[in-house]
Amino acid sequence: MAKTIRAVLAGNPNSGKTTIFNNLTGARHHVANYPGVTVSTEQGEFVVGDAKFVITDLPGTYSLTAYSPEELIARNFIIREKPDVVINVVDATNLERNLYLTTQLMELGVPLVLVFNMSDMAHQHGAGIDIARLSALLRVPVVETVGHKRRGMEDLCRAALDVAEGRREGGGVPLHYGHDIDPAIAAITAEIEADANLVLEVSARWMAIKLLENDPRVRERITQPAILEMAARHRAHLAQLLGDQPETVIAGRRYGFISGACQESLLPSSIEARHIQSDKIDTVLTHRFWGLPIFLALMYVVFAVTFNVGNYFVGWLESLFGWLGGTLSGFWPEGSGSLLESLLVDGIIGGVGGVVSFLPNILLLFMAIAFLEDSGYMSRAAFIMDHLMHRIGLHGQSFIPMLIGFGCSVPAILATRTLDNRRDRITTIMIIPLMSCGARLTVYALIIPAFFPVRWQGPVLWLIYFTGIVVAVGAAWVLRRTLLRGETVPMVLELPPYRMPTLRGVAVHTWERSWEYVKKAGTVILSISIVLWAMTAFPRRPEADGTYAREIAAAHGSYEQGVRELAGRLALPEDTDLAALLEKPPRDESGIADPHLAHFFSLLRQKRAIERRFAPHHHREGELHSDPACLQKELMLTHLRSADPAAYRLVAHYDDKVFAPREQILQQIERKRHADGLAYSMIGRIGRALDPVWKPMGFDWRIGTALIGAFAAKEVFVAQMGIIFAVGGDEDSADALRRQLRATYPPLVGLCILLFTLISSPCLATVAATRKETGSWGWALFQMAWLTALAYAVTAAVFQIGSLAGWGV
Amino acid sequence: MTANTQQELRKLSKVTSGQQVELVRVESGQAMQSRLAAMGLVPGTCFKVIRNDSRGPCVIGLKGTRLVLGRGMAERIEVR
């Protein structure tokens, strides 16, 4: 070993200094205690070529003042030991703050090597620094390392050796502190240098700077009162001149130097290159003519995914809640009329479950929006829409919350926080409910197939959404010219470069918004469901079973007649209790001695199994004929029939013409009992009392009560109609309800329901969100009132004109 | 100001895409000015007009960011 090089490691706490130290020295190091202080430093050795490094790991510090023991140790160590090279470890992800210590090391004039540690993270964050340029600006060698991956260690050793042996300059550029401070430093420096009695370990300039900073340790070192007096005079003068203590100003100037150097060396090939790449993508995505169609196409994809993919999961959740309700009901004997059962199953599971079932749609929509947001496309959407939005007195930024409004108004209203002008924000909040939300879609999904032929269903849905947008545009235009008058505040918006969204980022954003939705289900909708349930359940109608008893007896009578006829046709032995067997058909036919009867039950079991298997496909009415599952079902039944047509005819006759009618009649009676109870209940009475209010819109009290329920949450309309028409708990209740609706109301009323649902007051959760975000009940109540008034006017007008013209009546 | 850099003052809305300009002043209230300052737009700042069509907002590039300025805003910014 020819020579020994003494090196020190300096750096901020958490800069990865210790990792670098361990990488360099391996296990060969020991703790060295310095006399007089308890803070310890570690020492280690390593070999580079023919040189042996003895390296000391200094305590992690942010600067080199005299105000903390660690900083003083680090500073004194460097001043006294005069190491051959100081390796300054810098956290590359937090460059500007970390370089502060570097400026102080440069002031000391020690040979420096800068280590940009965690450089991989810095590159990921897009902090593109031109290392060569920064190195030249600072006049210090810079090496990049990744401590925990041991990357860059060889470069570091080579640079340290070069600087230590004087082959490379490491002293750093002299810092300037401005035309006010620099002369003071120069004057004090000259005074110190003129004093021959002072033996200095450090440069006179450093001493002068420290005196201006009022460093207590340096003042102790200077024994000549003349120098101290001079420093004090300059300090006082500068404090007056700058309006702040010189040490504060000097710190500011160091930061100024750092940010200047960093700005200068910002890499055009990193951030700028990504921008240039983004600009290229933007020439397509935000094209003058193609930008809008591309945007609309993207939105179409988002909605298609939201509903097509989401509905699979919605089906699962619906089954889950159905099962839950069924299981809970199972704890009570059938027909017990337990209030608790009714509260749990009809009120809570029916109400909250109906809303939570929708969560997959909401999650998917928010996921898509989060993806577009994180990728940087959303600010482009604002850019594209700005021109159009200006025409209604808003600007592009209002567009994003409106878009979210198609999912749910509550997060949309929260999203208006990005608008900094209050007028713009309130206008946007006021019109968001007109963006037809996901909950309204449940209503449309019930009503549209009930009243319109298949080929009109799509256009009607589109018309409803479009009407909402048109009304919103008109409303914004009016609001900006009346209540919310004032000039549009110009838009300033940052366009981030495009990037691939991270899974984590998308997940977090999706969750934040969806959580609002879940909270709404758990709080507002839960309470409202209970209230509505109570209004539907009370006051209870006095039991008058005599009314229904005759109908029930008649149903049983004709069923028994059918069974007797069947028994005759099967030619059974006298002792066979066919009725009991039919009430509870056996699981297999081995227990039945008579071969004809066994065959009958076998066929019955198979027929019912096929029908049960395809039951879920039954209620998708619109798809009935094209649904391959339905075709398959028909095929299987035909196959079953062809084996023994005569026997099958008997089975089918019993199952479809004898058994099913009894079940249907019993169910109908149950529904009627329910409906009579409802008419007697509070909600029924309110609905009837408000009859004159509904009439101009063509609604009766039943639709009226459902609309009252819909104020709690739009989905409640569907549930409430189900309760009123008493088709709840039915396997294909949606279809049954649609049949009832079609039989009761003309299509014009259907259209009126759609319009009123679209425009009328948003749900309670939205009103609460408006109250919270505008900070006033005034705006929330205004939103409720004017939207309801508008809905009333529009719906009544459509109904009256439609009735006169004879459309769909 | 040398004769070389001396150019006529014009509104940002009139600058065509691709030009490098210097911000001279913003005709707006305190709030808007401080908002622009926070985004790096102070008098003396040089930036590039990335995109300026005859309608819609314009895009400028400065200090490694892209900013969209609404048409109305661009009307009130004077550059040279």
Image: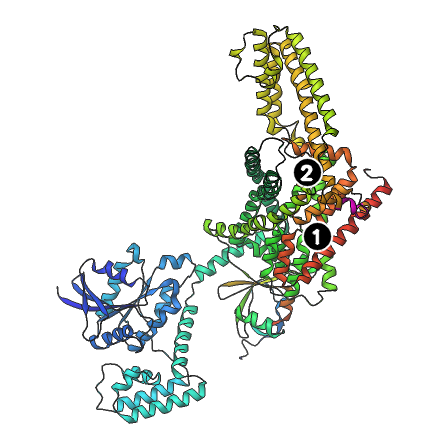
Query: In this orientation, which residue lies closer to the viewer: B38 or A324?
Result: A324
Helix or strand or loop: what does disc 2 sit on? helix
Q: Chain of mark 1?
A: A
In the rendered view, does A626 fall on the left or right side of A246? right
At horizontal 65% and vertical 43% (from top left) the residue drawn is: A533
Instruction: Using the numbered discs, state the Cα–Cα distance from disc 1 to disc 2 in whole angstroms.
Output: 22 Å
Amino acid type, mark 1: Ser
User: Is disc 2 surrounded by few (<14), some (14 to 19) or many (20+) residues within 10 Å?
Assistant: many
Locate residue A122, reporting x and y percent: 39, 60
The quadrant where residue A149 appears: bottom left
Please say if A423 is above or below A579: below
In the rendered view, does A33 fall on the left or right side of A125? left
* Residue position for label 1: A761
The quadrant where residue B23 appears: bottom right
Residue A362's tag is: none
At horizontal 36% and vertical 63% (from top left) the residue drawn is: A92
In the rendered view, does A251 fall on the left or right side of A571? left
Please say if A551 is above or below A298: above
User: Comparing marks 1 and 2, which lies closer to the viewer?
Assistant: 2
Helix or strand or loop: what does disc 1 sit on? loop
Please say if A244 is above or below A462: below
Residue A723's tag is: 2
The quadrant where residue A129 appears: bottom left
The number of numbered badges drawn on the structure is: 2
User: Is disc 1 surrounded by few (<14), some (14 to 19) or many (20+) residues within 10 Å?
Assistant: many
Q: What stretch of residues is rendered in magenta?
A: A686-694
Query: In this orientation, which residue lies closer to the viewer: A335 or A435?
Result: A335
Question: Mark 1 or mark 2, which has the lower sequence index?
Answer: 2
User: Is the C terminus of chain A in the top left, top right, bottom left or bottom right quadrant?
Assistant: top right
Locate residue A228, reporting x and y percent: 31, 90
Outermost residue, bottom side: A226
Locate residue A582, reporting x and y percent: 61, 16
